[in-house]
Image: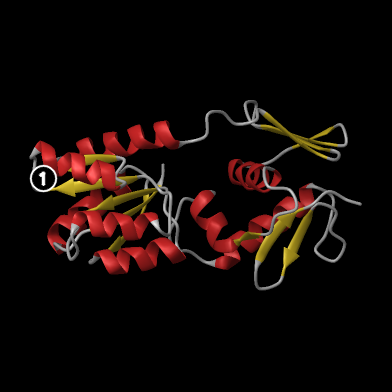
Amino acid sequence: MARVLIVEDDPLVRSAMVTDLTQRAHAVRTAGTALDGIREVSHHPPEVLDLGLPDLDGQQALQMMRAVTATPVIVATARDEEAEIIRLLNAGADDYLVKPFSGEHLAARISAVLRRTGPASAEPVISVAGLRVDLARREAVLDGRRVELSRREFDLLAYLAAKPGVVVSRQELLTQVWRQSYGDDQTIDVHVSWLRRKLGETAAQPRYLHTVRGVGVMLDPPR
């Protein structure tokens, strides 16, 4: 699963791509122009950007994108000349597709760029003070006692524990943990409340989970 931004001016093509990628469990956002796409990248950073180059020259659009993000970019182009493809790759594209292409082909390209650009390896065990989160076993232990968590609670705890002392916005949690572009903040608040209860703390007396009003949630070890 990935957060994908599609920049494509043809509404029919855009709709078909959204439908296919959503069915493959990706969280998809769209833009009809490259300029709108740059604004989307700035406000809602994706993990993969599929660029249809509707309103700007390909090289110009890529240079503008690269000024604001290091997100992998897959260019969808109608031109298959070698010189054009080399020009786009040199301008900052990570991969390309020649139109027309299938949804399966696009999904495979997305998986490939994520493998190439993703982290080499994740820490198998995250330790924060008396909290231990084993990613491989999907097990959380607090002060030597195993904490029974639902799948979503574990994913939420693991994500926050990987960024100790960092305030994580609700939007980031929604896209990274829930894999949704849109949603209700209350969903996150409810899961944080359940997680607090299982960690033996409350909002009034937090030990690990701290809510920063109007910003997000932070996992910070007790002092």
Which quadrant of the rendered structure holds the N terminus?
Answer: top left
Give the tally of numbered discs.
Answer: 1
Q: What's the residue at 23%, 66% (across, down)? A: 33
Q: Please state which of residues 199 and 168 is positioned toward the viewer in this rendering.
A: 168
Residue visible at 87% across and 31% down?
144
Q: Could you tell whether 193 is left or right of 105 in the image?
A: right
Which is nearer the eye, 122 or 25?
122
Residue 103 visible somewhere in the drawing: no
Residue 139 in the image: above or below residue 99:
above
Residue 13 lies in quadrant: bottom left
Of residues 79 and 13, the one nearer the viewer is 79
* Residue marked by disc 1: 99
Q: Position of residue 173 (x, y in %)?
A: 57, 55
Q: Quadrant of residue 206?
A: bottom right
Pick out the residue farthest to the right: 223
Task: State the colouring used for the structure image.
Answer: secondary structure
Q: Position of residue 185 (x, y in %)?
A: 57, 66
Q: Is residue 58 above or below residue 113?
A: below
Q: Residue at x 43, y 55 (%)?
A: 69
- In the displayed structure image, the side of residue 166 where residue 22 appears, left or right: left
Mark 1: which amino acid? Lys
In this view, which residue lies farthest toward the bottom? 214
Q: Residues within 10 Å of mark 1 (few under 14, many from 20)?
A: few
Callout 1: helix, strand or loop? loop
The reply, left or right, for residue 176 in relation to residue 9 is: right
Residue 8 image point, x, y percent: 20, 59
Where 23 falls versus 29 (above or below)? above
Q: Is residue 128 visible?
A: yes
